[in-house]
Image (cartoon, coloured by chain):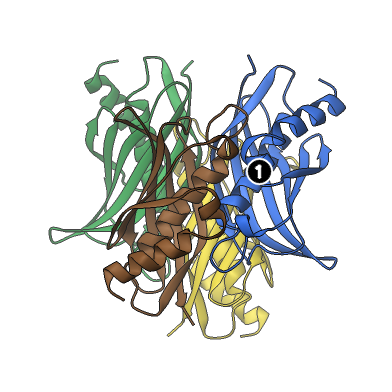
Chain colours: A blue, B brown, C green, D yellow
Amino acid sequence: MKKEDLKAAFEMITGTGFTKASGFEVREFEEGAVTLVLTPREDLTQFMGYVHAGVVTGLADHAAGAAYASVLPEGRVCLTIELKINFLKPATGDKLAAEAKVISGGGTIGVVHSNVYGEKDGVRTLCATAIVTLRAISAG
Amino acid sequence: MKKEDLKAAFEMITGTGFTKASGFEVREFEEGAVTLVLTPREDLTQFMGYVHAGVVTGLADHAAGAAYASVLPEGRVCLTIELKINFLKPATGDKLAAEAKVISGGGTIGVVHSNVYGEKDGVRTLCATAIVTLRAISAG
Amino acid sequence: MKKEDLKAAFEMITGTGFTKASGFEVREFEEGAVTLVLTPREDLTQFMGYVHAGVVTGLADHAAGAAYASVLPEGRVCLTIELKINFLKPATGDKLAAEAKVISGGGTIGVVHSNVYGEKDGVRTLCATAIVTLRAISAG
Amino acid sequence: MKKEDLKAAFEMITGTGFTKASGFEVREFEEGAVTLVLTPREDLTQFMGYVHAGVVTGLADHAAGAAYASVLPEGRVCLTIELKINFLKPATGDKLAAEAKVISGGGTIGVVHSNVYGEKDGVRTLCATAIVTLRAISAG
């Protein structure tokens, strides 16, 4: 699949289910590097008004999946085996952006670094940092 | 705070924001052991129809926070520092249940095991297993 | 390979390199559940006199690898993809014991819980808890 | 403590116990960024001849501890709460180098990225990537 097709396919997937309901959008889609954003709103927050850890993790994970998928051969998709994430600062801002970069993508196991930033008035703050491990499988 | 008050306070928190929007409910609330459940539905799923990793993680994390909060002295709440979670089976069923148990709760750092099960027709399947690290802070 | 042969093969492997130098020993070797022990000594400690995090992690990981290997079909071995470990109490005692149990072992990915206990005067203290993810490969 | 004193104190600590026995050496010691190296040898390896996961993790962790300690105020030391590490390539080479960088160091919790490289004939290969969470405590 060409990069434009891959991006379109990923945007279609993102426009369904949880990622649609949470307003995830694709900002950048390069080979091995994908950035997703969401706009914080009341139904995404925890009791202090920050974006809930589950949503932050979902953004980091979804970006990681796209980044690894972008380096796979045609006919291959991927699933998350496991992830780990440190929450460094309250997840808040006009936008939340998850930047995922493939660290290791050979064969059937992918490892992706995914950082989540809060963006407000032109300032970016690192809110969370994750490592995501994925497994490539046949799309069929 | 007495256990019944604690449970009520936690249910109030759970009835706001992301956890309300996702339909999280408290099934069991014991000292050091909390079980939360949700009912899978379309706006919580990923592209294959299973509950999204972000929602699964949110359920595991929210249960872990309640479990650690339940062993803290009055006037103390907690925040997640980090978590790691392995996804073992597709998260699906009539209900998804996260069972959190405090492994280490002394002082200012709590460590909680949180397992997520899919429940269907009386059968429980372990879908994900997590370790969550939390920090106790003053509620003020 | 029969269980006794498997155990013997694992003991041979454990009697080489780092695990030999650190005095790792097999205490129990069941299908899907392996316990290893070591005796703390000066060249395994960090500056406070407790067993170093690297050694504790090595014990937890080596036990996890054996536990997953014990459920694999003949001709398959395994490698650790990643692990995460929480250090709960100082690692000290007459013995340190890592108990590994396979949580998910199907196909090519294994997930193992590995707990490390300090043992002193008949009392066991949980020092560390880990989740280890492994990959099965052909032995050839 | 001045930077030179800090480095000397850390080298003294590294020259004891497990880190001495394993031949850990300080290559760089900057504020918030520390690189340690070791020379692979037979008593540090696993059965395939690569450096054992426990030793790789110990190097990553020890570098992380030094990096966080280097940004703490006088009279404070640190302990590892937890870590997670992905093993990407066989750990081998003339040298193994762990580069640790503090990502978040405020207050009482530090988060450090620690990457481990194999170095051979002037080529560096990323073998492992870790996130380490630490807690600051009083040195007394």
> In which chain is the residue bearing label 1?
A
Q: Is residue C58 visible?
A: no
Q: Quadrant of residue A123?
A: bottom right
Secondary element type, mark 1: helix
| Left or right relative to A26: residue C13 | left
Residue underneath mark 1: A21
The residue drawn where x is 63% and y is 28% is A78
Residue B80 versus residue A100 in the image, above or below: below
Q: How many marks?
A: 1
Res A48 → quadrant: bottom right
| Residue C85 or residue A135, whichever sits in front | A135
Determine which quarter of the picture holds residue C13: top left
Residue beneath the point at 37% across and 21% down = C72
Outermost residue toward the left in this view: C122
* Residue B28 position (above or below residue C131): below
Task: Give coordinates of residue B87: x percent, y percent.
Answer: 48, 37
Screen quadrant of the N terminus of chain B: bottom left
The image shows residue A36 at horizontal and vertical percentages of: 75, 46
State the residue in front, B33 or C105: B33
- At which x and y percent is residue C50? 35, 65
Left/right placement of residue A11 relative to residue B84 reads right
Residue drawn at 64 percent across, 58 percent down: A128
Residue at 47 percent of width and 40 percent of height: B86
Within 10 Å of disc 1 (Cα), the crowding (few <14, some 14-19, many 20+) is some
Residue D63 position, x and y percent, is 58, 61
B20 vs C38, nearest the viewer: B20
Q: Amino acid at mark 1?
A: Ala
Does residue A71 appear anywhere in the picture?
yes
